[in-house]
Image (cartoon, helix red, strand yellow):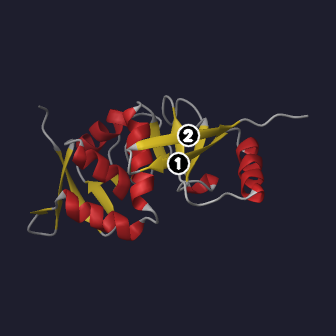
Amino acid sequence: MPRKIKVEFIENFLVAWDPVEGSTLYKLGFYGKPLGIAKPKIPEFTVPLILDLMEGLYLAEEEKIVVYEGKEKKKVGLRTLQKKAKQLYEEFEEKYAVYRDLRGKGLVVTPGIKFGCDFAVYKQGPGFEHAPFMVSVKKATVGLTATEIVKAGRLATTVRKRFIIAVPDLGKGKISYLIFKWFRA
């Protein structure tokens, strides 16, 4: 098994300080953002890599990274990361289930905040294509208004993306995806 990459847990983020190790993580599936580089043109960089908590938890569960914190480099376990993520993300369990499912299907998943959704999803990855999908996670018990659907559809059309609603059923471990395609009448 390959050596796990060391990352430091700081506040709400994880940092791979070694640029070589950060580049390795980035190449595994476009994980993280190189510090100060909005859109890396090449997968090798000379700066630390910043991971958000959701992708860091995923990489820790997949045993790709080992997480530590503090000067004494105390190891941080999965439960600690999950607890922090639950505090940071609204409806974390549902969002993380969708994140894991999409990553498990070989897709690249990044935060979708700039598109007003939970995730921007790529088939190939940033730099190779624009994200073709924007995904919003909704609980099955929460309704969607017609206005919300129209707003999301208009936004998706404006940014040339397919709008997807992911509805996880945590009890059954199943996720339903509702894909909207807009057309002119």
Q: Position of residue 167 (x, y in %)?
A: 53, 48
Whichever of labels 1 and 2 marks the residue nearer the N terminus, that label is 1
Residue at image location 63% in from the left, 56% down from the top:
116
Observer-nearest of 142 and 15: 142
In the displayed structure, would residue 84 be above or below residue 25? Answer: below
Residue labelled with disc 2: 177
| Residue 165 left/right relative to 24 | right
Q: What is the quadrant of residue 13 in the picture?
A: bottom left
In the displayed structure, would residue 91 be above or below residue 167? Answer: below
Q: Position of residue 30 (x, y in %)?
A: 40, 39
In the displayed structure, would residue 76 be above or below residue 3? Answer: below
| Residue 122 left/right relative to 146 | left
Q: Residue 167 shows which numbered tag?
A: 1
- Quadrant of image for the C terminus: top right
Mark 1 is surrounded, within 10 Å at the Cα level, by few (under 14), some (14 to 19) or many (20 or more) other residues, namely many
Residue 48 seen in this snapshot = no
Q: Name the kind of residue labelled 1 in the image.
A: Val
Label 1 with label 2: CB-CB less than 8 Å: yes
Secondary structure at badge 2 equals: strand
C-alpha span from label 1 to label 2 = 6 Å
Mark 2 is surrounded, within 10 Å at the Cα level, by few (under 14), some (14 to 19) or many (20 or more) other residues, namely some
